[in-house]
Image: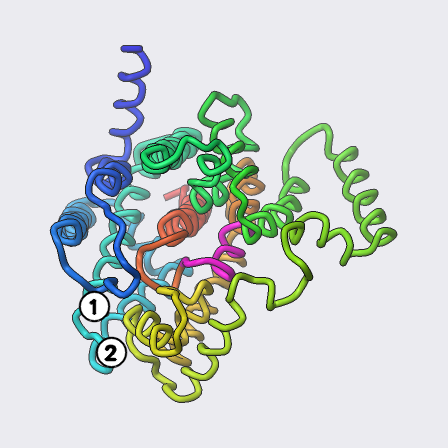
Amino acid sequence: MKKYIESFKQLAGAGGICGVLLIIRPLIYFLFSRKRDLNAYSSVDASALIFILYAFICFFIAFKTLNKEKSSFSKLLMTSTPLIWFIIYTIYGAISMIWSVNFALTGFRAFECMAMILLIVAVMQRLFTTCSLEKIIDWTILFVTVDIVFSLARTIQWTTNIGVLVESSQMMSTVFFFMALYYPRKKWYHYLIIIMAIFSGSTVAYIGMAAGSISILWRKTKFKPIILLGVMLATFAICVIGPEKVLKETVFHDKKTISIEETSGRDHLMEVTIETVENFPLGLGFFAGEPAIFYAKGLSAINAHNSLFSAGIGLGYPGIIIMILFLAGVGFTVFSKKIPPHYKASLMGCFFVGFTHCMGNPALGSRVYGAWLPITYLFILICSFYVYGKYKSN
């Protein structure tokens, strides 16, 4: 046991103080989070103050770390990759305080996003300038595992139902499913991530995992001919059986039909988003506009469940354009030849899952909530591998 504790401490410490701050976030959430009514999204209580304090600590320590380090890695990461679009989006989100329906809420949520972006960038700078690529993946797996463990701990407080427990990490486990799946020497925590992802119960994640399976074609394996044959046979079978029937028996097995109306109310969120953007071309303010407009329309939702919808409601047409540039940029980057070949398939598979979360769950474009943190970490990790591959000679 002592050996495992020492190994954990050594690996966790590889990310520096910023890495420790990132890893303990699930612990802070476990200790201080509480359930609240949806209409209390802007209330400030003792629990909210803890998270406000955490955001400020993360921002100032990350800012200080990035200024203190002599490495140019973070500068390249934030200016020479698609991450620059996400930073611009977040800054524009802060500027939207000017016309926001709740300027204080918009200001803090934009600040919180920037704090977490800088924190992750600081972690990447530390990892990529002091660790091997394999250790960086190990650190990432540790980050994911800790989040899953505390997600299980939060859920077990109110139920011991296995079916509910395995669904307690729908965002984190699914985003990093392929990273755990492709890891060569698996340990119990890799299998934990895989199991939690497979039984997550997230239709959106399953679509992403199915799309991400194409990444196996980029893996260096002696079984590639067999895999290619399997893909061809599966494609032929789907054509024979019929795509609609296959979707109904798999992804939409718990739905009456395959349609936008069977997406848990997301069709109504889309309708409200279109109407809002037409009436408010600059949006209603980062994050603050979403719950305000949804409650006004009688919808019990705090988030648009789509990154482009969130961008549209909060920041209007400019926000949608910037978010598209970021998502497309990361998509092109993960296919880049600059990504080290050994890690390309893993990152590519994870990207597809992250992208589908952006299209169907609370993720980028809004506050730090839902799939925001795992996807932001993943996309910055992809950009970091790109910087490493392109500039490692320096």
**Residue beneath disc 1:** 105
Label 1 – label 2 distance at C-alpha: 9 Å
Viewer-proximal residue among 345 and 96: 96
Left or right: 197 as drawn, with respect to 227: left
Relative image position of residue 104 (x, y in whole percent): 16, 70
> Does the magenta run of residues contain 167?
no
When asked about the image quadrant of residue 292, the answer is bottom left
In terms of secondary structure, where does tag 2 sit?
Answer: loop
User: Is 318 located above or below residue 14 in the figure?
Assistant: below
Which of the two labelled residues, at mark 1 and mark 2, occupies the earlier sequence position?
2
Q: Residue at x 44, y 47 (%)?
A: 171
Name the magenta segment's main secondary structure: helix
Relative image position of residue 183 (x, y in whole percent): 53, 29
User: Is 341 located above or below residue 142 in the figure?
Assistant: below
Tell me, for residue 100, which label it has, or none. Answer: 2
Q: Which amino acid does the dot numbered 2 rest on?
A: Ser
In terms of secondary structure, where does tag 1 sit?
Answer: helix
Q: State which quarter of the image contains the C terminus.
A: top left
